[in-house]
Amino acid sequence: MEQVLFINCCIRREQSRTQKLADYMMQCLKELDTYEIKEICLMDEALQYFSDGFFLQRERLLEKQDLQHPRFRYAREFAQADKIVIAAPFWDLSFPALLKVYIENLCVEGITFGYNETGFTGLCWANHMVFLTTRGGFYQDNPMEMGSRYLEAMSHFFGIERYDCIAADGLDAGVRPVEEILQEAKEKIDTLIKTF
Ligand SMILES: Cc1cc2nc3c(=O)[nH]c(=O)nc-3n(C[C@H](O)[C@H](O)[C@H](O)COP(=O)(O)O)c2cc1C
């Protein structure tokens, strides 16, 4: 079975509309019976951003090439997954800082990326990253949108060839019923899964 790493950053948990999209996608994948889903709920992790001792510890470990240290477990798990699914709401033109802290912990030279005379090279095994998000306003093809665009760049940085974002836009705009917009996004998930 291929392993899907589902990175859950739906901060509002049961209240979250992004979580609804993620639940739907995970349910569809389970029904296929070909994927093992491993969920990492970022809200339940004691994630630390880099400062002072935590930053210096990383420098020391990298110098010793101690890549098996427990603090690099997120990077090892990410690098080994066959598929990546990230779910996070659109916050402040991007995504919640919690997801950025997780990504900061993923970027470990020798695990998720390498470096040589020609530049950076991704070391992750996965061939597809999917980002599920919901937004209050409308940001399709809008340069102000910096969540999906950043994740797409990170996906390439990690060596993951294919990237897709499914976004439900305008949930707080009051223009269309929320359920209708979510239903449209679910239909896009149905289509995506066919080539996942
Ligand atoms: C802290 C915060 C920041 C937000 N920033 C934006 C924003 O910059 N642009 C926007 O269109 N909506 C913004 N929203 C609205 C959310 O994108 C929208 O309500 C989304 O559906 C929330 O996802 P959730 O239901 O999964 O929590 C923000 C909401 C919160 C709570």
Image (spheres, rainbow, N blue to C red):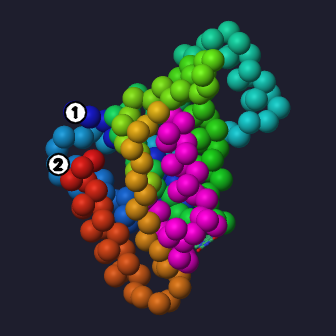
In this rendering, the count of numbered labels is 2
Q: Give the residue pinned by disc 1.
A: 1
Above or below — where is 29 with respect to 50? Answer: below
Looking at the rendering, which quadrant does residue 190 occupy? bottom left
Question: Horizontal and vertical percent for residue 128?
Answer: 37, 42
Above or below — where is 22 with respect to 152? Answer: below
Residue kind at label 2, given as amino acid type: Leu
Please rate how many residues cluster around mark 1, counting C-alpha atoms within 10 Å: few if below 14, some from 14 to 19, many from 20: few
- Whole-Å distance between the Cαs marked 1 and 2? 11 Å
| Pointer 1 or 2: first along the chain | 1
Question: Horizontal and vertical percent for residue 180?
Answer: 34, 82
Which residue is located at x 51 percent, y 34 percent?
Answer: 158
Residue nearest the observer in this picture, 130 or 96: 130
**Which quarter of the image is occupied by the N terminus?**
top left
Residue extending furthest front? Answer: 118
Q: Which numbered disc covers residue 32?
A: 2
Report the magenta residues as a range: 132-158
Q: Is residue 184 on the magenta stretch?
A: no
Question: Horizontal and vertical percent for residue 149?
Answer: 55, 55
Which residue is located at x 34 percent, y 59 percent?
Answer: 23
Which residue is located at x 50 percent, y 70 percent?
Answer: 140
